Image (tube, helix red, strand yellow):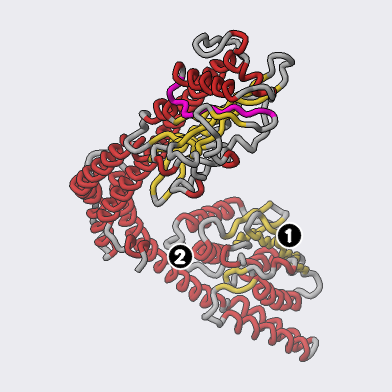
Amino acid sequence: MNMKQLFQRLSLRQKIVASFISIALVAVLSMNYISHFYYSRATQQDFYNIAETTTVGLNHQFEIYIQQIARSTYAMNAGVLSYSSILQRQNASLIQDWLRGDSTMSSEHRYMIREILNKYIAFNYPEIEDIYLMSQDRRVLQASGSTADIQLARLPWYGRPLNTKLEIFPTFYEDSRAIPLVAVAIPIFDVKDTTLSGRLVLHMRLTEIKNMIGNMRIGDTGYIFMVSSDRRIVYHPGEDMLASPIEETELSWLALDKPHSLQTWRGKQYLVSYSISELTGWKTIALVPLKEMATGLQIAQISAIVVMGLLILLIMIAVPIAANRITRPMIQLKQAMEKLQTGDLTVRAPVTPGSDEIQLLSVSFNRMAGRLNELVNTVYKMELKEAQTQLLQKEATIHALQNQINPHLLYNTLDIIKSIAYLEGAPKIEKMAENLASLYRFTAKLDQSEISLAEELDQLQRYLEIIHIRFARHFQSKVYVDDKYKHARIIKLSIQPIVENAVKYAVEPRNGKAAVMVSAYPEGNDLIIEIADNGSGIDDMVLQNLKDRLTMITEQPNHAVKASDSLGLTNVHNRLVLYYGKEYGVYIHSFPNQGTVISVRIPFIRKDNIS
């Protein structure tokens, strides 16, 4: 079962508790992550700023120190100092003479040069281990004695051509000494023609560098060291790493391609920052573990964990209580819905004061239950009324069928049959008998209350054929109904009885010298069928009485029709109102000495006919 399915099976209160705890955890963890991220960035930036200031200052201090040493040798190299206890004024330029390669210089003069160099060391910089003079022709004079015991080729400066600029060579070891040294090569220019004549090389211990860097600490284990441009370690607190390529030491993992970076080694993160000396090209590097610069971050993380624990404890206590208060009305509403589902329409949900969504939902439920109760009662009454209406429709239909056997029609038809049989012979009698039989078969069908307009008009045509036989010379009739209207549905025996009334009251009084017209046209969603005659019209009092009867039937279709009514206008109107509604039925328009128009309104476009 996955988490989604498990969550769906929880109760509402359990979902609320789980959601609150999840949101709180996400919020605290997000806050912890964000604070850790930005605090780390701030810590790194602070370290970079401090380290940059420190390393730049150290480089500048070291450069000043080297330049000061170089300037202090200029007078000695030029031969302008007079050491009265050693040599006379005229011999003060012995260094210049040696560099020129004077062949007359004796061993005593070379001794004097060594004394000058040693005096310079004694009077100025005790950290200078030794001094060498080197001429253009690569002759070397050592201040401390003979150069025979030294392999000059191993000295970093010996194989390098002379340079007009000050040069500094990184840490190295002489053959006979275990003291790490750096070499400072100072160019010497001939005082006569200012050409480069040689160099003065100072072998210096790392004392001053150690004094400048060694006492500086960043964090508990962080430190500063120096690496030359060829990636050899110039200075490091661990002396066993001096003069070694950085790739051969435990710092081989360091990437020094960016001045500021955060690097990882053996699972620990280190902050690395360096600056490059303009004089030496060396990198002064500050290296410190990140955790030593971010002690405040650990405190913040511990605080966040404590706060998260307290928050979860508070949620575990407070949220169930709050969830119970929130869900109680919903549970009561659920119980009310279950009772309503069983059919208890009197159930109501308890409503507490307030205007939150659950309380509003309870109010809406109570309104819905009350309205549903009203609707059920209304539907029951409507169903009862509809049953009564259907019963009345059946009674009216049976009454119409019973009255359809009109003695007057039967008498006239038989009279016609008798006359034709006497005057003309069997064919017409056969036709009339056929039509009459069709009419009675049509009216005798009790299983069909609504038929198509085409069927109704077909029976009307049969009836009109009988009338035409009766009044063959003068009677006229016409049915103008477009085929597109003939699919409309209509109550059975709605048109023929009205036409029969027209024959009775308009055609017969004139001995057949009259006409009956049937037409149809749409009006909105309804179809209007008109039966018009050109008789004498209806008397005003009779007309008003008929209209009042029709209006009464429209208002009270269940009680307005008398049992003695024939299949005339009122019966047809009553059946139409009962079946289609009060908007439909029969309407009368009569004009004195001009005729009468009966309009029958039935539905044409009905919902059950729309595809």
- Image height check: is 431 above or below 185? below
Question: Which residue occupies the extreme bottom position in the image?
Answer: 426
Measured in 3D between alpha carbons, the distance from the residue under mark 2 to the one under mark 1, in whole angstroms, is 29 Å
Place of residue 127 in the rendered image (x, y in percent of width and height, measured from the top left):
44, 25
Disc 2 residue crowd, few under 14, some 14–19, many 20+, Cα 10 Å? few
Over which residues does the magenta segment extend? 125-136
Element class at badge 2:
loop
How would you rate the neighbour count of disc 1 (Cα within 10 Å): few for under 14, some for 14-19, many for 20 or more? many
What secondary structure characterizes most of the magenta part?
Answer: strand
User: Circle 2 is placed at which residue position?
Assistant: 562
Choose top left, top right, bottom left or bottom right for residue 332: bottom left
Left or right position of 536 against 151 = right
Residue at the spot of label 1: 534
Is there any visible trace of residue 454 in the rendered image? yes
Residue 86: mark in rendering = none
Return the x and y of residue 391 as percentages of the image width and height.
Answer: 42, 71
* Residue 443 placement: quadrant: bottom right
363 relative to 233 in the view: left or right: left
